[in-house]
Image (spheres, rainbow, N blue to C red):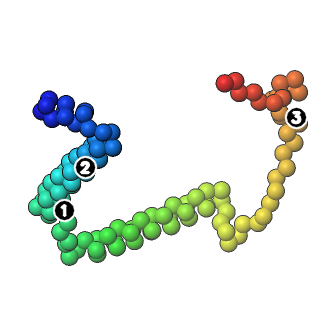
């Protein structure tokens, strides 16, 4: 093995890069083929007759839960889209503001 590495070091850089690329592709291909063989033999890719029906039922249940959650959030403040009236609430911030004029200024972020 040391002789092989010594011979590789003597070759030009573009040849060494090509050998490294082909070696990486080869190792990746061996791993991918092994993974596919193990997955195929374990039945990972096997289709089941009930899998589509179960998937559709799961999606339907998720949509129902989302609709119920939306209704709960929509009614959280006691209103919903059917009877909600547009409104603007003005708050006098001058009396309750905690910042004093001396502390208001540009934000400086030191780096």
Which mark is nearer the camera, 2 or 3? 2
* Disc sitting over residue 95 in the figure: 3
Q: Is residue 34 visible?
A: yes
53 relative to 94 in the view: left or right = left
Give the labeled residue for mark 1.
44
State how far apart marks 2 and 1 are (Cα): 30 Å
Image-quadrant location for residue 96: top right
Image-quadrant location for residue 103: top right
Q: Nearer the viewer, residue 90 or 100?
A: 100
Mark 1 or mark 3: name the one nearer the start of the chain.
Answer: 1
State how far apart marks 2 and 3 are (Cα): 73 Å
Q: Is residue 24 visible?
A: no
State how far apart marks 1 and 3 are (Cα): 67 Å
- The x, y position of residue 56, in whole percent, is 34, 73
Q: Residues within 10 Å of mark 3 (few under 14, many from 20)?
A: few
Q: Quadrant of the N terminus?
A: top left
- The x, y position of residue 30, in whole percent, is 17, 52
Give the labeled residue for mark 2.
22
78 relative to 50 in the view: left or right = right
Residue drawn at the location 45% of the way across and 68% of the way down: 63
Q: Is residue 90 above or below residue 50?
A: above
Instruction: Assign a secondary structure to mark 2.
Output: helix
Which mark is nearer the camera, 2 or 1? 2
């Amino acid at each position: 093995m040391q002789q092989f590495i010594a011979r590789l070091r003597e070759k030009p850089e573009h040849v060494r890069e090509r050998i490294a690329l082909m070696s990486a592709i080869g190792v990746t291909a061996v791993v991918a083929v092994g993974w596919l063989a193990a997955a195929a033999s374990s039945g990972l890719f096997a289709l089941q007759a009930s899998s589509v029906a179960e998937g559709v039922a799961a999606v339907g249940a998720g949509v129902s839960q989302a609709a119920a959650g939306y209704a709960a959030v929509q009614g959280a403040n006691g209103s919903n889209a059917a009877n909600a009236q547009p409104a603007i609430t003005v708050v006098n911030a001058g009396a309750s503001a905690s910042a004093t004029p001396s502390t208001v200024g540009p934000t400086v972020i030191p780096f």
